[in-house]
Image (cartoon, grey):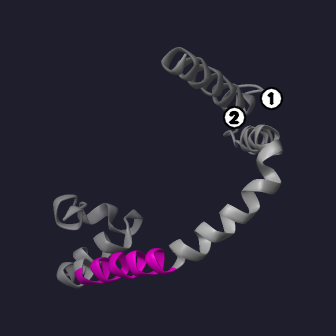
Amino acid sequence: PSIFLGAPEADTALAVLPGHALLMEGRGAEAIRLSSIGSAGAVIVSLIMAIPMAFFFWKIYGMINAYIGWILVLIVVLMIATENGEYVEGQGSLVHLKFKFYAILLFFISGFLGIFAFD
């Protein structure tokens, strides 16, 4: 439905999602059909993979249970370290660190929210 409801203007047709691009070509119904087939396929694959993945995670959980905290810290550090900032001419050489700072700030704010909500 968003393919028809969020139809872009003609001048922005090059920068839209594939479904909107098909709509702009007059093939909106085909876009809906393809989206439905893709969604149904994803449900089928998810159902097929659910049981094998459950066994896999059940087996591996015992090995990594003692290290879950460190694994989560490593993931957070990697996410913050790979946060990319934009270089804007004339704003100094440290402007790219602004987005890393925002990521760290958001991490701590969400942590405090979790402490207050669940404590």
How many other residues sit within 10 Å of disc 1, few (<14), some (14-19) or many (≥20)? Answer: few
Is residue 36 located in the magenta-colored stretch of the structure? yes
The residue that appears at 60% across and 76% down in the rendered structure is 52
Helix, strand or loop at label 2? It is loop
Which label lies toward us, 1 or 2? 1
As displayed, is residue 17 above or below residue 32? above
Q: Name the residue under label 1.
A: 93
As displayed, is residue 105 above or below residue 31? above
Nearer to the camera, 85 or 108: 108
Quadrant housing residue 100:
top right
How many other residues sit within 10 Å of disc 2, few (<14), some (14-19) or many (≥20)? Answer: few
Residues in magenta, as a range: 33-48
Residue 77 is situated, as x and y percent measured from the top left of the image, at 78, 38
The residue that appears at 38% across and 67% down in the rendered structure is 17
Question: What label sits on residue 89 in the rendered view?
Answer: 2
As displayed, is residue 22 above or below residue 67? below
For the residue marked with disc 2, what is the amino acid?
Answer: Glu
